[in-house]
Every structure is written in structure tokens, then in C-alpha cells.
Amino acid sequence: MVNITQKISLELKKNHFIAELLGERDKFIKQIEKDFEVDIFVLGNNMEITGEKKDVEKTVSLINDLVLQINLGQKLNLQKLGDSIKIMESKSILKPHEIFDNYVIVNNGKKIKARTEGQKRYIEAIKNNTIVFSIGPAGTGKTYLALAMAVSALKSNEVGRIVLVKPVVEAGEKLGFLPGDLYDKVNPFLKPLYDGLYEMLDVEIFQQYMEMNIIEVIPLAYMRGRTLNDSFIILDEAQNTSPEQMKMFLTRLGFGSKVVITGDITQIDLPEGKQSGLVVVNNILKEISGIEFVYLTAEDVVRHNLVQKIVNAYKAYEDDSANRAKAKESEKKEE
């Protein structure tokens, strides 16, 4: 039982609001009680919330926003509820319904929605700029949302094809020794991109597009000398490019094209001592109109909730290791 310091009653005027808020077998209300450590009692159209003052206030704000979501036709489910709770607990200046109202239509009316404030900024950046850099940890939707925007642009005839590019550092960019044609050579390295496209297009349409070169997959090394017009181009895992490769890639941009570059500067696989093109590019291009940098954080992780905790734990460990290294260096200088 919680220590009761405040009790607030809410009256919901529409019967279906209560039913949708409760969820099947009250699963939504039970989740809210668990996460906010409150007790919720429902009778008819009335909802009574009891608990610690700050927890009750957060719960009231959440329920008011969930009602707005339902009113806007945003279907409530456990994932949406979890995202809403996470947003209410974060430092976001936007309410959940404002974030969820930002979406991309991919295939057969399917909507892929922003789930965090950072993702909302990311989608808007792609809409409003020719080149967008998305930098952040695993699980923040960098590649997935870029693919969604690419499919949406293709379906609405804004571009004529999608070009997927990746630096294949695992093969040292020397693919000639691998068996098969180019598709067979790069297929293992581009599997994460295919998974997203299968979901957005379904397998048959994806395969048709591949056969017709409407969707093209290219190792970064094969981009040299090309100019890509009327294309939506995604460079994935860009932290594994050199500054020279990044320059080469960016200058492939043709008329009517859009480019999204994604990467995680904490997961660089380049040989030791080799600089990442993604690390230096901000200083070079930050003042150019039409190019935007979007930085996603652990708060934008939308995988299992443990992923965010893992990202934060690794960051804390790396920061601590860096501080200890600096301290040792200082000690050596003093000696």
C-alpha cells in the first residue's frame, strides 16, 4: 500500500474513454499504478487516484494526455502507454499526444510514428532539409525512421529510388574475394536494413523493387564516381567512414535527392588511430543551410527498457574510465 497524502477524482464524460483507459482486464490502469506507485479506483465514469502528491499529479497529467490521444484517434496499447509514461517522466517539453501525432505513412496506410521528442525532431529535420545527420546510440530509431521516410518518399513519387549505402569495414571494403554477385557479397552486412524494409513493404514488393533497381544496395567503396539524382540515399553506420570517404559520399548528391547519414560515434570499428568522418563532419558543415544534425540520446531509445539502462551504464563506465585515465596522466606529469 502507498502512503496516502493526496486524493484526486476525475470525471470522464465519455463512456468509451474509461473502457479504453482501463484496457483489457484493466491492464493499462494496472501498469500506471505500478509505474507511478498510486492506487486507482474506477466507478462508472469516475476515477479516483490516491498516493504521494507528486505521483498523483503525474498520474493525472498522464491520464489527461491519454484521453487526448484517444480523442485524436491515437489507438492506445501497452507500447504507447509505456512511451507515454517515459515521456512524462523525461525532460521533454512536449506532451505524448504532440509527439505521437508526428508520423510517416509507408505502405497500405501503415503509420510509423515518432515515439520520443528526439524522434519527432528527426522526422521534421528529414522533411525540411536535403541532408540530415542522425547521431545517437543503438535503439534510437536512427536507421528505422530514415527507412520509413525513404519508403514514404518513394510511395508518394517524391523520389524514384532508394539507395542504401554502408561502409563494409568487416570485409575491409575488399569484396572481390567474396563469392557471388554484388548483392550476395554485401547481403550479410546490410541485413538490418532489409529487416526494416521487409516490415514496411512486405517481402514480395521489396524483392520486386530490388530486381527493378528501385531499391539499390551499395557498399560505400562502390559509390566513387557516381552521381545520384532523384534518390533517397541512406548511409548507415557512418561512424565507420574516414573523413575522405565521408567527403566522397556527400559529393555524390544529385538533383532531386535527399540524404540521411546515421551513426553511433561510440561504436567506431575503424583501425586504431584512424579518424571517423562522422566525428569531424559537424565542424566542417554545421554552418551550411539545408544540412541539419540531429543528436539522439538514451532518452530516445525505443527498444526494450533495459536497452536504455544498458546505454546509460556503458556511458557512465566510459566516462569514469576516461576520468581515471586523465587522473593517472596528471599524476605522471606531477611526478
Image: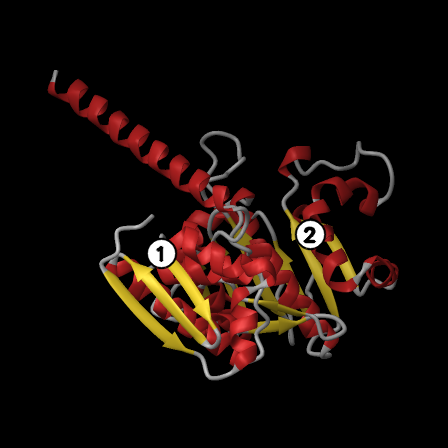
Check the image and name the residue furthest to the top: 335
Residue 276 seen in render? yes
Check the image and name the residue furthest to the bottom: 13
Q: Which residue is mark 2?
A: 193
- x%, y% of residue 212? 87, 64
Vertical arrangement, residue 29 with respect to residue 297, above or below? below
**Mark 1 or 2, nearer chain start:** 1
Is 109 on the left or on the right of 67, as rendered? right
Query: What is the number of the mark on residue 117?
Result: none
Q: Which residue is mark 1?
A: 38
Q: Quadrant of residue 186?
A: top right
* 62 vs 176, nearest the viewer: 62
Quadrant occupied by the C terminus:
top left
Is 246 on the left or on the right of 88, as rendered? right
* Helix, strand or loop status at disc 2: helix
Label 2, residues with CA under 10 Å away: few <14, some 14-19, many ≥20: some
Label 1, residues with CA under 10 Å away: few <14, some 14-19, many ≥20: many
- x%, y% of residue 294? 44, 61
Label 1 – label 2 distance at C-alpha: 42 Å
> Label 2 is placed on what type of residue?
Leu
> Label 1 is placed on what type of residue?
Val
The structure residue drawn at horizontal position 72% and vertical position 75%, both measured from the top left corner, is 109
* 318 vs 232, nearest the viewer: 318
Q: How many marks?
A: 2
- Look at the image and name its color scheme: secondary structure
The structure residue drawn at horizontal position 51% and vertical position 63%, both measured from the top left corner, is 115
Residue 130 seen in render? no
- x%, y% of residue 263? 52, 50
